[in-house]
Image (cartoon, helix red, strand yellow):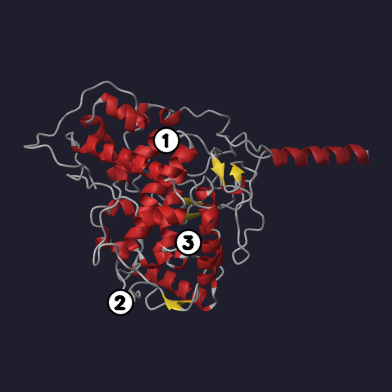
Amino acid sequence: MKLSLSLALVALAAVGSAQGPQRCSGMRVRRNAASLSPQEWQSIANVLRQMNDDGAISRFGASHDRLFSRVHGNTCFFPFHRRYVLEFENIARTYDPNFTVPYWDATESFRNPAADPVLSNNGLGGNGGNNDHCLGSGIQSNMQVTYPNNHCLRRSFNQGDSIGAWYAPEIISSYIQSDTSLSTFRENIEYSIHGAVHLGLGGEMDTGYAAQDFSFMVHHANLDRLWWDWQNSHNSFLMYDGTGSNGPASLSDLIPEDSSVPFNGATVESVMVLGYGNVCYTYDSSSGPPQSYPSGGSNNSGANNNNGGNNNGANNANNANSNTGNDNGNNNSNGNNNGNNNGNNNSRSVTSSSSNLANRVLENQGIQNSLGSDIINRFFPGLGRRSGVLKRREYQTQPANCGDPIPFPPRLTPEWIHMHGYDPERVECAHKNACEIVEALNNSTYTSPY
């Protein structure tokens, strides 16, 4: 009898393990940084000051710098930074249990980033001053850090007093829709908006220890949001392909960690699905967690898991009628929901990178009404395969480049490419593709809502 009971308990344990992490009983909601009140920014400032006094801010900067080459330029980029920002958030919550890292949807201010309200004195602060570029405004004003030496927190915009235009939301929307593997999506994100924001802000953000600037956390929270949207759009919650930090990517890989910010042996799979295990958060503009843990995960170390292999690229968007950009817009959150912020969401497809639900509608409808079928099927397949012809803008003269009316996306600097160990040819290929997206939009009657 005892033997039978023991065997039954072992069997139940094996089933539980095979089912993967347990669903979170409650979830916090990461909100758009643009929606925070001055009082909420001040609460964040209070936590950051306490963390800095205790040396935590510099520990995060040091750990990121020491792990730099292992967590950039490969597919581990996304799971590492998901776990990294979560660890920062967890530590911050020991100072204030209501603390949640907001996300900065930087593409919405792509035309004139320096004017973004998030960079105001109430928020992250603006440019550094004087020759030392010390940050004298915002929630980290006059902060002193200790890694790699004692110095003021620095900010140095890449065009002096301004920041050059960075990637338009439509470019990132195209990546979400058209990239059918995580390795491809990671490359496109890492070579585009990821680098553009780091380089645009400069100073601390242009170093391996960028995590000392809270801009790093809100920026990477946004990249994490985009990854989550991509995962939902392709029903690819467990896809982890390409090259990881130590060779071929596997869900059983340990996420690289540094002793100053330990992850306690966390695996890649442990952070793949929001709302499960210890990843108990979601985003105010995104789908909540799936109702059950995706199949093909736990105890499966295959590199190309994608929820049972059911990945048909961007066209597995359930049906074209779900792609008007309205992504079940009844998902506004005050941060106190239980993670099911989309209610009865019958479609998990995401066709826009924007966190602004009204702009999603305008973007998607504008693209559908302006671009020909060949361009939509190539760059925006999530809007549904269709037939039609390009509706051309009536230019007096053809624009010299794709900077009118959507600005031409910036290139990464040679120094940044070398620092990350990127392949310059692949970076240039990604930039060319982004330019072609902008050219297609600018040569049509499409008008960006951003």
Residue at (30% x, 65% y) in the render: 157
Residue at (21% x, 45% y) in the render: 406
Res. 370 image quadrant: top left
Tell me if mark 2 has few (under 14), some (14-19) or many (20+) residues whose alpha carbon lies within 10 angstroms of its own: few
Identify which amino acid the numbered label 2 is placed on. Asn
SS at mark 3 in the image:
loop
Q: Residue 131 carries which label?
A: 2
Q: Mark 1 points at which residue?
A: 179
Point out the frontmost of discs 1 and 2.
2
Residue at (71% x, 41% y) in the render: 16
Residue nearest the viewer, comparing 129 with 43: 129
- Tags 2 and 3 touching, CB below 8 Å: no
Q: Earlier in the sequence, mark 2 or mark 3?
A: 3
Point out the frontmost of discs 1 and 3.
1
- Tags 1 and 3 touching, CB below 8 Å: no
SS at mark 2 in the image:
loop
Identify which amino acid the numbered label 3 is placed on. Thr
Q: Mark 3 points at which residue?
A: 100
Q: How far apart are marks 1 and 3 (CA)?
A: 30 Å
Point out the frontmost of discs 2 and 3.
2
Identify which amino acid the numbered label 1 is placed on. Asp
